[in-house]
Amino acid sequence: MSSKEQTLSIIKPDAVERNLVDTIQKKFIDEKLKIVKAKKIQISKDEASEFYKVHQTKPFFDRLCSYLSSGPIVVMILEGNNAIAQNRLIMGSTDPKNADDGTLRKMYGLSIDKNTVHGSDSIENAKKEIDFFFKDNI
Ligand code: UDP
Ligand code: MG
């Protein structure tokens, strides 16, 4: 079964800084995910804390929010068949050391913190995360 879905993707500061935006976007397109919207922004630490609030009790939370707000990011709505799971496959495991060959995190991730991309993990979170960045339809 396949169903058309949308998911939120973020190209994190480590990848924007290394000029990997075009390369990563090409990978999504090659893997049959359409980039419906994309914008380059920088968010505050408070906004990052709101975005990642599911992780607020984790030991890495403060570092994670400092990092996501440390430089420009590219936020995108990706659309395609099973887009949420498909994007997670393209990204690879959270820790680049454990990611499969050919995944974005294996190819470009620097560490578990600087792991190049974010992707929504469920239909519910995809809706919330898309709304978080694109609620004003910009
Ligand atoms: N993270 C971290 N240390 C950990 C686990 C996660 O720094 O031990 C960071 C990592 O950058 C990850 C983010 O927190 O991308 C969110 O964690 P999650 O478990 O949701 O991983 P993801 O969904 O991004 O694969
Ligand atoms: Mg996650």
Image (spheres, rainbow, N blue to C red):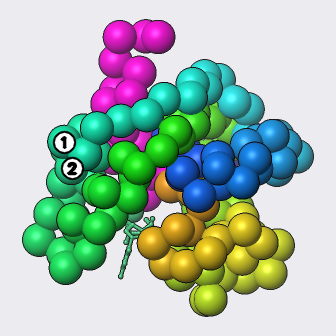
Q: Is 70 left or right of 81, judged from the image as shown?
A: left
Q: Is residue 111 above or below residue 138?
A: below
Q: Position of residue 98 (x, y in %)?
A: 61, 89
Residue occupying the point 48% across, 44% down: 71
Residue lying farthest to the top in this orientation:
137
**What kind of residue is marked 2?**
Ser
- Residue 47 sits in which quadrant? top left
Q: Which SS type dominates the magenta stretch?
A: helix
Viewer-proximal residue among 125 and 48: 48
26 in magenta = no
Residue occupying the point 64% across, 46% down: 16
Q: Which mark is residue 49?
A: 2
Name the residue that disc number 1 marks: 46
Instruction: Please provide the residue range marked out in magenta.
Output: 119-138
Residue lying farthest to the right in this orientation:
30
| Residue 77 shows in this picture | no
Q: CA distance from mark 1 to mark 2?
A: 5 Å
**What kind of residue is marked 1?**
Asp
Image marks 1 and 2: residues in contact by CB distance under 8 Å = yes
- Residue 97 sits in which quadrant? bottom right
